[in-house]
């Protein structure tokens, strides 16, 4: 059974950087797409980034393009989200996901982590 564990969240000042990591259990990690979503209280989850099984294709929300980078290391069963130039609007719980597609649809992802809090101060 697949389990996803996020880490790397925390408090950072605007303009700073954080690198989120997601460690995945399971023997077939390399066969699936991975993604990151985020959510704030009272709002729907937003797609942040996705990556194909081989890392060859990625997708990004418009509000993070040029600032965030998703990557994966299949040998380590880990996916990353490098977040640069963080803004207060980026404050949210960030969730790691695994599924069949790397796009923006949450329905494409079958497994979700518990999330890691990212807080960006002004």
Image (cartoon, rainbow, N blue to C red):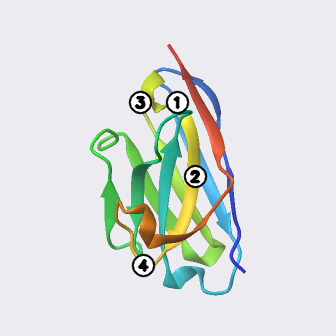
- Residue at 41% of width from left, 66% of height from top? 51
The secondary structure type at the circle numbered 1 is loop
Q: CA distance from mark 1 to mark 4?
A: 29 Å
Q: CA distance from mark 4 to mark 2?
A: 20 Å
Q: Are marks 4 and 2 in contact (CB under 8 Å)?
A: no
Residue 87 in view: no
Residue 13's label in the rendered image is none
Residue 85's label in the rendered image is 3
Mark 3 vs mark 2: give the one in front.
Answer: 2
Q: Mark 3: few, some, or many residues within 10 Å (few <14, many ≥20)?
A: some
Residue 54's label in the rendered image is 4
- Residue at 56% of width from left, 76% of height from top? 74
Residue on which disc 2 sits: 95
Q: Which mark is first along the chain, 2 or 4?
A: 4
The secondary structure type at the circle numbered 2 is strand
Mark 3 vs mark 1: give the one in front.
Answer: 1
The secondary structure type at the circle numbered 4 is loop
Q: Does 114 sit left or right of 13 as displayed?
A: right
- Toward the top, the furthest residue is 122
Residue 91's label in the rendered image is 1
- Toward the front, the furthest residue is 42
Q: CA distance from mark 3 to mark 4?
A: 27 Å
Q: Which mark is first along the chain, 2 or 3?
A: 3
Res 79 → quadrant:
bottom right
Q: Are marks 3 and 2 in contact (CB under 8 Å)?
A: no
Residue 95 in view: yes
Mark 1 vs mark 4: give the one in front.
Answer: 1
Q: Position of residue 62 (x, y in %)?
A: 27, 44
- Toward the left, the furthest residue is 62
The secondary structure type at the circle numbered 3 is loop
């Amino acid at each position: 059974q697949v389990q996803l564990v996020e880490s790397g969240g925390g408090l950072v000042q605007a303009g700073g950087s954080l690198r989120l990591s997601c460690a995945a259990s399971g023997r077939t990690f390399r066969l699936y797409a991975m993604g990151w979503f985020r959510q704030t209280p009272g709002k729907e989850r937003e797609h942040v980034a996705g990556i194909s099984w081989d890392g060859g294709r990625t997708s990004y929300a418009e509000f993070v393009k040029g600032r965030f980078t998703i990557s994966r290391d299949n040998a380590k069963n880990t996916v990353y989200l490098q977040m640069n130039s963080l803004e207060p609007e980026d404050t949210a719980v960030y969730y790691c996901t695994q599924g069949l597609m790397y796009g923006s649809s949450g329905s494409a992802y079958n497994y979700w982590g518990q999330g890691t809090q990212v807080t960006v101060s002004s």
